[in-house]
Image (cartoon, rainbow, N blue to C red):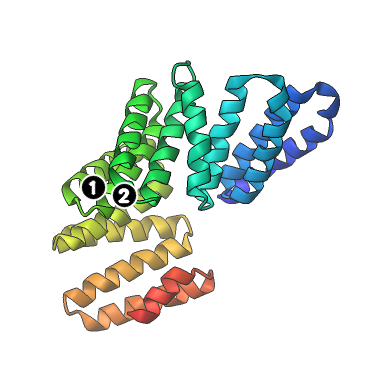
Amino acid sequence: AADNFSGAIEKYRAALQGAESDGPAERARILHKLAEAEIRRGEFDSARSALLEAREVARPLGDSRLNARIAARLAHALTEAGSYRRGRRYALYAYAVLRDTDDHRTVGQVGVTLGLSSARLGRWHEAIDWLQNASATFRRIDDIDGLVTALNNLGLVYKNLREWREATRFLEQALKLDERAGLYARMRGHNQNLGLIRYRLGQWDLAEEHFRQSLRIARELSHASGEAGAKLALGMLARRRRQLERAEELFRGALELATSVNARREAELAREF
């Protein structure tokens, strides 16, 4: 899926070659689009480099909204790369500039970024506030993709807090929206997380149903690490039910898959089991 954005990235890089004569505003715009494609591809270091260049190009223009939109995406790239405090500073700047404008989508995205950085810094209730604000923003503008992102992250925050009812509520909302849209890649993750919650609650039949859905989707998408994760979860459940031969078979299958795609976390867990 990451390679789907390669064509766009090459197009923007080619456009940069001819943007010197078009002025700094056009160059900043192209760099911003290039960074967006890199983010969607999961290349956060490349996105950060493009956004830092865009910031330097745009700064002399004195366009506060343009600078804030660049800061918003830079905050996201930094947060995904683990620079939570630095990302948070850029996000707060972007939010202060854009919150009273009509750029609602960016304001919602910044809310999600601030929710993520707050959660990763252990500020759980602050994370919930930002993500709930983001959810409300996305609902107002009927941005389903943004809404699912906010709901999913709310579910994961509550899961980390072991508040299972709230975690289930938000993850099930996200799953239903993605089912309607047919977004299978995200449905895999929702099912996996809901399965883990049901497992924790001792609701083993429901847990198995979610894990099997996660496994089916991973296979359909040729998502080897996702398939390994689902097999690990099913193996864990089988062992809890004292189905030891089945558990062993699932763990071996998970290890094979994880090793084949260098999914280190899944491979380590399979070896432990």
Furthest-left residue in view? 202
Note whether 207 is above or below 155 in the view shown: below
Report x, y in % for residue 19: 81, 28
Note whether 137 is above or below 43 in the view shown: above
Q: Quadrant of residue 26?
A: top right
Mark 1 nearby-residue class (10 Å; few <14, some 14–19, many ≥20): many
Say which residue appears at 28% left-offset and 73% top-offset: 235
Report x, y in % for residue 189: 36, 52
The answer to whether residue 43 of the structure is visible from this angle is no
- Mark 2 — residue? 156
Report x, y in % for residue 231: 34, 69
- Mark 1 — residue? 167
The amino acid marked with disc number 1 is Ala
The amino acid marked with disc number 2 is Leu
Say which residue appears at 66% left-offset and 48% top-offset: 46
Q: How many marks?
A: 2
Does residue 127 appear left or right of residue 28 in this picture? Answer: left
Report x, y in % for residue 172: 25, 43
For mark 2, give the secondary structure: helix
Does residue 179 appear left or right of residue 54 in this picture? Answer: left
Say which residue appears at 57% left-offset and 39% top-offset: 74
Mark 2 nearby-residue class (10 Å; few <14, some 14–19, many ≥20): many
Q: Residue 184 has which mark? A: none
Q: Quadrant of residue 8?
A: top right
Query: Label 2 vs label 1: CA separation?
Result: 6 Å
For mark 1, give the secondary structure: helix
Residue nearest the observer in this picture, 35 or 255: 35
Q: Quadrant of residue 149?
A: top left
